[in-house]
Amino acid sequence: MLDQYNRDINYLRVSITDRCNLRCMYCMPKEGLSHIGHDDILRYEEISRIVNVAVGTGIRKIRITGGEPLVRRGVVDFIASLKTIPDLRDISLTTNGTLLSEFAGKLFQAGVKRINISLDSLNPEKYERITRGGDLNAVLKGIDEVHRIGFSPIKINIVAIKGFNDDEILDFAKLSMDKPFQIRFIELMTLGRTDLDRDSKYLSNDVIREKIREIYRLEPVDGERKRLDGPARIYRIAGGAGEIGFISPVSHHFCNLCNRLRLTSDGHLRACLLSDEEVDLKGALRGGCNDDHLAKLIIGAIAKKPIRHDLACDEGHIKKCIKDMSTIGG
Ligand code: SAM
Ligand code: SF4
C-alpha cells in the first residue's frame, strides 16, 4: 500500500518481547528498566492475527525482533506457524546471537533464511563490557553455525560508538574479506532510557567509511542488490567475499526509502521508529474488534507515516524518543 508520499509500505518489524538476556549500554539502562507485564505483551495468536490482517493491507515481509526474540518461549513454533500465511513472502530475524548455536537449525527449518546478528566488538572483554555480561564466544559460535547451515544473507550489525569500537573498524571491515557476510555499521541513535550519553558517543558513518577507504578500495554495489538492501549503502572491498553496509539514520536519513511499520511488543503500531506516535492495536483486539476494523487501524497508521524523522535537526540538536528500543524492536 502506498502512503501519502508514495512509499510502498510492505515491511513489518515485530518485537515479540521487550526482555533480553543482555543489557547493551546503548540500548538499556543497567537497572530500573521496568519490563512490561506479561499480560500487556501481545500473545502469539494476537501477533499472528495482526500479521494476517497486515498482509491484507500489502505487507509482504516481516522481521522478528525484540528485546531478544530467542528468549521468548515458543518462538520457533510461532515463526513456523507464520509460514502458512498466503502472500507473506519473507520472514527474517534480528538477534544478539548468544543463543544461535542452539536455535539455528530449528529456525532454518521454521522458514528463517535471512538473519541479522548484533556484534559490537571482536574483543571478548569489550564485548562483555558493552553488553554487560555477554559471551563473545557464544556469538561467534552462532555465526559459524548459521554460515554452516546456509542462512543467506547473514548480516552483522555493529553500532558505532566513539571511544569504544572506533579502533576496531578495520577488523570488522576485514571480516567481509573472507566470509560472505554483510558487515553493517549503524549510527547510534538517541531513543529510550539508557545510562550512556549517546549524543557524545555518536560517530558518523562518513568517518567510518573514510577510515576504511584509507586502507581498502571500496567499490559500491549497485543495481538490484542495492534496491533490495533498503536503507543500507552497500560497498565491497575489492576482491572480498562479503560486503560492507552503512546505515546512517542520523547523518543521512533515508526516510524517503522507508517502507516499514513496527509492531511493538506491547501491541502498538508505530509508523516511524523515531516518532512516539502510535496506534493501539492491542486495545482494539482485546476490545473484540473485527478484522476490518483492524485493517482500518493499520491503514490509518500508514496514512499518518511522517515524511521524515527529526532525530537530528539541521542545527545539530538531537531529539529524544521516549519508548525503549527493546519494546519497539530495532
Ligand atoms: N536483541 C536483538 C539484537 O540485539 O540484535 C534484537 C533487538 S535490538 C533492539 C535490534 C538492533 O537495534 C540491534 O542491532 C541493536 O544494535 C540496535 N540498537 C539498539 N539500540 C540502538 C541505538 N540506540 N542506536 C542504534 N541502534 C541500536
Ligand atoms: Fe538486548 Fe539487543 Fe538491546 Fe542488546 S541491543 S540489550 S541484545 S535488545
Image (cartoon, helix red, strand yellow):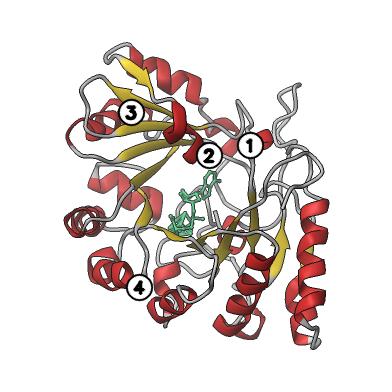
* Drawn side of residue 26 relative to residue 243, left or right: right
Residue at mark 2 to residue at mark 3: CA–CA distance: 23 Å
- Where 62 falls versus 174 (above or below)? below
Question: Disc 4 marks which residue?
Answer: 110
For mark 4, give the secondary structure: helix
Q: Which residue is mark 2?
A: 230
> Which sits in the foreground, 86 or 90?
86
Disc 1/disc 3 C-alpha distance (Å): 27 Å
Q: Amino acid at mark 1?
A: Leu
Relative to 128, 163 lies left or right: right
Q: Residue, x 75% and y 28% (percent of image)?
A: 313
Q: Are marks 2 and 1 in contact (CB under 8 Å)?
A: yes
Q: Could you give the CA–CA distance between mark 2 and mark 1, rounded to whole angstroms?
A: 7 Å
Q: Which residue is mark 3?
A: 169
Visible residue check, residue 36: yes
Name the kind of residue labelled 3 in the image.
Ile
Q: Is residue 109 left or right of residue 65?
A: left
Reading the image, the residue beneath label 1 is: 257
Picture coordinates of residue 175, whole percent (x, y): 23, 35
Mark 2 close to ligand 1, CB under 8 Å:
no
Q: Are marks 1 and 4 in contact (CB under 8 Å)?
A: no
Q: For the residue carrying disc 1, how many other residues have a C-alpha within 10 Å: few (<14), some (14-19), or many (20+)?
A: some
